[in-house]
């Protein structure tokens, strides 16, 4: 069984950063990440969540 993982955006809540992803358009995951990693994803073109 294969899953498709799609990175949607980077979410900031206070001082915490999360990578918001979707798995097979069924499950939405909010994965905590470090501020430096969030900056890297944003520099690579991943949008901020609104």
Image (spheres, rainbow, N blue to C red):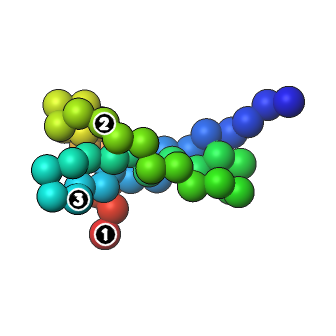
- Specify few, some or many for label 3: CA neighbours under 10 Å numbering under 14, 14-19, or 20 or more: few
* Front residue of this view, candidates 31 and 49: 31
Would you name the residue on which mark 1 appears? 50
Q: Position of residue 33 (x, y in %)?
A: 30, 36
Disc 2 from disc 3: Cα separation: 12 Å
Tag 1, which secondary structure?
loop
The answer to whether any part of residue 46 appears in the image is no
How many labels were placed on the picture?
3
Q: Position of residue 1 (x, y in %)?
A: 85, 30
View extreme (right): residue: 1
- Specify few, some or many for label 1: CA neighbours under 10 Å numbering under 14, 14-19, or 20 or more: few
View extreme (left): residue: 15
* Residue 2, quarter of picture: top right
Q: Is residue 20 left or right of residue 50?
A: right
The answer to which of marks 2 and 1 sits earlier in the sequence is 2
Tag 2, which secondary structure?
strand
* Front residue of this view, candidates 34 and 45: 34
Disc 2 from disc 1: Cα separation: 18 Å
Q: Is residue 42 left or right of residue 32?
A: left
Would you name the residue on which mark 3 appears? 13
- Callout in the foreground (2, 1): 2
The answer to whether any part of residue 19 appears in the image is yes
Would you name the residue on which mark 2 appears? 33
Q: Is residue 16 left or right of residue 20?
A: left
Tell me whether the residue at label 2 lies in contact with that at label 1, contact meaning CB atoms closer than 8 angstroms.
no
């Amino acid at each position: 069984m294969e899953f498709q993982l799609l990175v949607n955006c980077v979410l900031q809540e206070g001082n915490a950063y999360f990578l918001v992803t979707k798995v097979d358009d069924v499950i939405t995951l909010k994965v905590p990440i470090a501020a430096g990693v969030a900056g890297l994803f944003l520099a690579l073109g991943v949008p901020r969540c609104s």
